[in-house]
């Protein structure tokens, strides 16, 4: 995984609540066993009609907005535990998803795939949506080390929580296996003490 420290980016606003994993990546795309191509099918049923044509008006088809931060409505990632949802988000190039609430399984899957889920207050979320509608060039800065997210237009900032272990993994660009391999000497020393 790539190391994550600080990211400043324009945003993709998706002010829809209760977005579940089937909307993020429809079930018909789950047959693949590798992560390749999932970004092309992110929100497929909202992005494309039955003939495969882009649906005008859906945010990912609107060239006015773009960036590597998705700002979503409350309760993002509910539904089934499919890790493919995190694969699709990462595959599209999104590095941070911001919401006022995430489903726990989605949150963990995102972290395991190098996507940082940032929980903010509903008030801050509403302000971001309002400002993005007025100014599509709005940017946010997410600083993992200080655990802050800042609206660069207003200067308003909030702290966010993250599991310390997952924070270390993101900062160092490690998945769970890489982390354990980095601790191999300590693990072996501990095993020798047990004998």
Image (cartoon, helix red, strand yellow):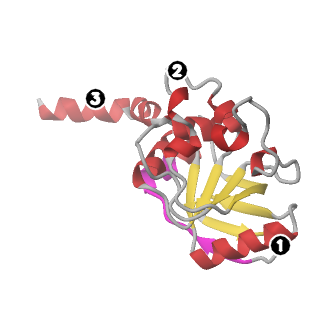
The disc, 1 or 3, on the residue closer to the chain's N-terminal end is 1
- Magenta stretch, residue numbers: 156-169
Query: Who's the residue at 60% across and 63% down the image?
Result: 73
Q: CA distance from mark 2 to mark 1?
A: 41 Å
Q: Quadrant of residue 139?
A: bottom right
- Is-magenta flag for residue 98? no
Question: Against 172, is 53 above or below?
Answer: above
- Is-magenta flag for residue 161? yes
Percent across and percent down for residue 125 are: 65, 71
Describe the element under mark 2 as helix, strand or loop. loop
Q: Quadrant of the N terminus?
A: top right
Q: Nearer the observer, disc 1 or disc 3? A: 1
Residue closer to the observer: 57 or 175: 57
In this rendering, position of residue 58 left or right of residue 113:
right
**Residue 188, numbered circle:** 3
Describe the element under mark 1 as helix, strand or loop. loop
Q: Residues within 10 Å of mark 1 (few under 14, many from 20)?
A: some
In this rendering, position of residue 71 left or right of residue 34:
right
Percent across and percent down for residue 188 are: 28, 29
Residue located beneath label 2 in the image: 32
Q: CA distance from mark 3 to mark 2?
A: 37 Å
Question: Against 179, is 10 above or below?
Answer: below
**Residue 153, numbered circle:** 1
Percent across and percent down for residue 143 are: 66, 60
Q: Nearer the observer, disc 2 or disc 1? A: 2
Describe the element under mark 3 as helix, strand or loop. helix
Q: Nearer the observer, disc 3 or disc 2? A: 2
Query: Who's the residue at 66% across and 66% down the image?
Result: 149
Q: Residue furthest left?
A: 195
């Amino acid at each position: 995984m790539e190391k994550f420290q600080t990211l400043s980016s324009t945003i993709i606003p998706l002010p829809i609540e209760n977005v579940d994993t089937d909307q993020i990546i429809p079930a018909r795309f789950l047959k693949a066993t590798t992560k390749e191509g999932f970004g092309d099918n992110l929100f497929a049923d909202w992005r494309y009609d039955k003939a495969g044509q882009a649906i005008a008006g859906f945010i990912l088809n609107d060239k006015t907005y773009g960036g590597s931060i998705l700002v979503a409505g409350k309760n993002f990632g509910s539904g089934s535990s499919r890790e493919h949802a995190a694969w699709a988000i990462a595959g599209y190039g999104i590095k941070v998803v911001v919401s006022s609430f995430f489903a726990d399984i989605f949150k963990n899957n995102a972290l395991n795939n190098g996507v940082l889920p940032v929980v903010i207050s509903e008030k801050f979320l509403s302000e971001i949506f309002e400002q993005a509608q007025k100014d599509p060039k709005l940017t946010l800065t997410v600083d993992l080390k200080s655990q802050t997210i800042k609206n660069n237009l207003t200067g308003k900032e909030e702290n966010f929580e993250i599991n310390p272990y997952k924070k270390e993994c993101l900062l160092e660009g490690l998945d769970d296996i890489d982390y354990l391999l980095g601790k191999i000497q300590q693990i072996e020393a501990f095993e020798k003490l047990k004998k």
